[in-house]
Structure formats: structure tokens, C-alpha cells
Image (spheres, rainbow, N blue to C red):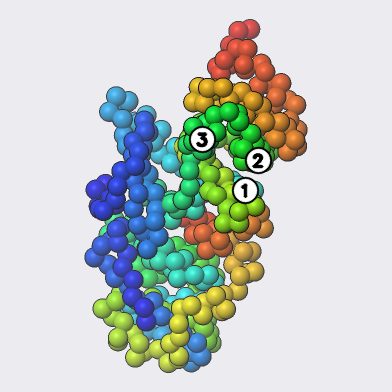
């Protein structure tokens, strides 16, 4: 997994992000998360254009944790919520969460937990650069309501993160 | 807030906000912090500051949707009124025009016509989408040159804090009038340049005549609407 610092907003927070394919135990992982035994976010890899998209969602989540402004139960569910262009909480899990049989997933956790998290996931850890191939860009455009005119003047990841942040003032 | 701005350099302090350069997740960013004004009633001050932050985000997004270059939004803190935006590498149109005058004083501004025409086109698209910028000046446009030498670059529109949404020719006319005044006072002798911009606006706008008529009207009376009658 690759680690990232969330400075300057949160100089003390470091997170790890890993992209996995051929994952076989999503159901297990999800159960452990809901029991509170695993502090990670599981994200549907097809919905992620670039690592930066995750960093924006995670920065906002950890920031709102410090500020006591979380809208969902944990900082990790908040990451999924922040990824979503909609303010409906239930919708974000459907759109960005993984289903029991998902094979391409992204795991986000605190850096200190990354070695134990790695032992939990049964699948191949691959380079985050493969996101470019795995991402379903047409679906992403549709979901975030990104117009062709917008993509013509701005990289897709910038369109996506702007939409993610702008939902706060909807 | 000081912690946003660790290792950040203040680059401008306006009447509404302090603007810093910084880094966010390895990307260069602009940090815009709207501060409270002590001379205003606290209740009004808070409302106004918040309203402008929200208006700015909305207008930036609406412009992006219609294909106008604006900085991407990376983070917002609606409690402290802080906005993190993509850092745009480029030159303000103000500097572009001033440099041109220094470099080629004899040629008028003919070298800038292609860029100025694209500004006219962008404003037409913006007004067709009923977005009123509210503070059009040559400092609020950033020219980013193209990597291909035969192409003109992109114009990024910034600083939408005073923006609003309106379909009225009056508001669009005032928007253009504010720009005209800014243009002529910042760049003396640039009447022809502004005319080129206006012509491009007319050529690209879906319905320019009511706006241009209003512009003429506003030129006669000034920006404030007459309340007589």
C-alpha cells in the first residue's frame, strides 16, 4: 500500500491506500467493518479516476472528524460519503461501497494499521496507476453529471473533485 | 487560520479575503480566506461572508459546466470561510496587457486581439448561462499560454465572490460596463481593445442586442439603476 500525508490541513494524519484485484473475501471484510473490528474504507475501484480523488475525500473526512462535524458514523464511512456527489447517505454506500462479490477494490486505512490490514485482504495488491484502466470513466461522468464541455477544458479528476466539494453548498 | 497556511506565502490581500499559495496533497493550491470585517454588524458580516463563499463555489461550478475554464475546487471549510482552489499557472490579463504596451508601444494592442476575442467569447457563454460575474476586471482573468505555439492559450475566470445568477439584460450590461471601466482605467488608450472584446461578445452571444442596448444605457447613467418614477 502507498502512504500519503494529509498536510497542510492535517499534518499529523497519514493514511495508506491500496488497490487490489481478484479479491475473494469482500463479504468477510464488510462484516468485520460493520462489527467494528476493521477500521478501513472499502471503495469500488471502478468509481475512482485518480488517487487524488481519494485524498480529497479522506482529507475532508479526517478534517471533519477533528472538527466533530462527521455526518456518518465513522471517519471511514465519511470517506465514502465525501466521494459521493449526492447528500444522501444511503446512496453513497450503493454507489461507492463494494458488494460482496467485488473483485477490484480500494482499501483506505490509517498508515499505522496498514500492515495488519494487508493480512486481512485476500487478493492481489497492484499499483494505483492501474486505476486509469479499471475506472469506468463513462459511469463516473454520468454519476457526477460532468458535461462534455467541462471535460474539454479540465482533466476528469478535477471535474470530479470540484463536484464532490461543491455538494456542500447545494 | 494559521494551520492552513503553514509554509504558505501570502500573495494578495484584498478587501474581502487573504489569498495564499500553498500545497495540498502534492498539488499547488491557492488558499482563499475570507475574513470578518470588524466595522460591520457581526450578524450581517457573517451572513455576507458566508454568502459570498457559497456564491463563489456555485459560480465556479456553473462556469465549468458550460466549458469556461475555472480553477478546480479542492476543499472548503464553511465554518472558517476558507477555500482551496487549483493554482493556475499564468499571467493575469492585466499583466498581459501592460507587458504588451511596454514591449510593443507602437503596435497598439493588435498582438492581443486573438486573446481578447476569446475573452469576449467566454463572457458571451457566461452570460448566455445567466452567470453574472459581478466584478469583471482584467485582474480576475488569468491567461495560460498554450503548449502548442500556434494556438492561443486558455483564459481562466477567477474571483466569483460577487457573482449572481440573472437572466436580465440589465445585469449583464452592468457586468460589461464594470469591465469597460476597469479596462479603460487600468489600461489607458485601450478603447480599441475593448471594442474588439465587445465585438467578439456580440458575435458569440445568443442574444446580444438587449445587453448591448443596456450597456449603452448604463454608460449614460452609471452603474446604479435610476429609481425615478
Give how far apart the Cα atoms at labels 2 and 3 are. 17 Å
Q: Which residue is mark 2?
A: B114
Q: Please report, as a chain letter, where disc 1 is located.
A: B
Residue A67 location, quadrant = bottom left
Q: Residue at x 51, y 43 (%)?
A: B142
B196 to the left or right of B47: right
Disc 2: CA contacts within 10 A as few (<14), some (14-19) or many (>=20): some
For mark 2, give the secondary structure.
helix
Image quadrant where residue A116 sits = bottom left
Q: Which mark is residue B103?
A: 3
Classify B118 as above or below A12.
Answer: above
The tag earlier along the polypeptide, 1 or 3, is 3
Q: Percent from the top left, x then y, of residue B64?
A: 58, 50
In this view of the protein, which residue sits in the foreground, A69 or B26? Answer: B26
CA separation, marks 2 and 1?
7 Å
Q: If the image is split into quadrants, where does the C terminus of chain B sit?
A: top right
Residue placed most toward the observer, A40 or A148: A148
Which residue does the numbered mark 1 point to in the structure image?
Answer: B152
Q: Residue B122: give x, y in percent of width and height.
A: 64, 41
Amino acid at each position: 500500500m502507498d502512504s500519503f500525508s494529509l498536510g497542510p490541513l492535517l499534518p499529523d494524519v497519514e493514511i495508506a491506500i491500496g488497490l487490489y484485484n481478484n479479491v475473494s473475501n469482500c463479504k468477510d471484510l464488510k462484516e468485520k467493518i460493520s462489527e467494528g473490528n476493521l477500521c478501513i474504507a472499502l471503495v469500488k475501484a471502478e468509481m475512482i479516476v485518480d488517487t487524488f480523488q481519494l485524498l480529497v475525500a479522506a482529507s475532508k473526512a479526517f478534517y471533519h472528524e477533528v472538527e466533530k462535524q462527521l455526518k456518518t458514523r465513522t471517519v471511514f464511512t465519511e470517506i465514502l460519503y465525501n466521494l459521493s456527489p449526492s447528500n444522501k447517505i444511503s446512496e453513497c454506500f450503493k454507489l461507492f461501497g463494494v458488494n460482496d462479490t467485488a473483485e477490484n477494490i480500494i482499501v483506505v486505512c490509517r498508515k499505522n494499521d496498514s500492515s495488519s490490514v494487508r493480512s486481512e485482504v485476500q487478493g492481489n495488491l497492484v499499483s494505483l496507476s492501474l486505476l486509469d484502466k479499471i475506472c469506468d470513466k463513462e459511469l463516473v461522468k454520468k454519476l457526477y453529471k460532468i458535461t462534455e464541455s467541462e471535460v474539454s477544458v479540465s482533466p476528469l479528476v478535477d471535474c470530479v473533485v470540484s463536484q464532490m466539494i461543491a455538494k456542500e453548498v447545494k | 487560520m494559521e494551520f492552513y497556511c503553514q509554509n504558505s506565502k501570502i500573495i494578495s490581500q484584498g478587501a474581502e479575503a487573504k489569498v495564499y499559495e500553498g500545497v495540498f496533497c502534492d498539488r499547488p493550491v491557492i488558499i482563499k480566506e475570507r475574513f470578518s470585517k470588524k466595522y460591520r454588524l457581526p450578524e450581517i458580516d457573517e451572513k455576507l461572508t458566508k454568502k459570498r463563499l457559497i456564491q463563489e463555489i456555485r459560480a465556479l461550478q456553473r462556469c465549468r459546466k458550460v466549458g469556461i475554464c475555472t480553477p478546480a475546487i479542492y476543499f472548503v471549510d464553511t465554518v472558517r470561510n476558507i477555500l482551496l482552489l487549483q493554482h493556475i499557472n499564468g499571467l493575469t490579463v492585466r499583466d498581459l496587457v501592460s507587458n504588451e504596451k511596454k514591449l510593443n508601444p507602437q503596435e497598439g494592442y493588435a498582438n492581443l486581439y486573438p486573446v481578447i476575442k476569446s475573452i469576449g467569447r467566454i463572457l458571451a457563454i457566461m452570460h448566455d448561462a445567466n452567470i453574472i460575474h459581478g466584478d469583471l476586471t482584467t485582474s480576475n482573468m488569468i491567461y495560460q499560454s498554450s503548449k502548442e505555439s500556434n494556438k492561443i492559450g486558455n483564459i481562466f475566470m477567477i474571483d466569483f465572490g460577487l457573482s449572481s445568477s440573472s437572466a436580465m439584460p440589465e445585469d449583464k450590461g452592468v457586468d460589461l460596463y464594470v469591465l469597460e471601466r476597469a479596462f479603460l482605467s487600468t489600461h489607458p488608450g485601450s478603447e480599441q481593445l475593448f471594442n474588439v472584446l465587445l465585438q467578439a461578445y456580440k458575435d458569440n452571444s445568443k442574444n446580444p442586442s438587449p445587453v448591448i442596448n443596456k450597456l449603452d444605457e448604463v454608460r449614460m447613467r452609471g452603474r446604479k439603476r435610476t429609481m425615478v418614477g
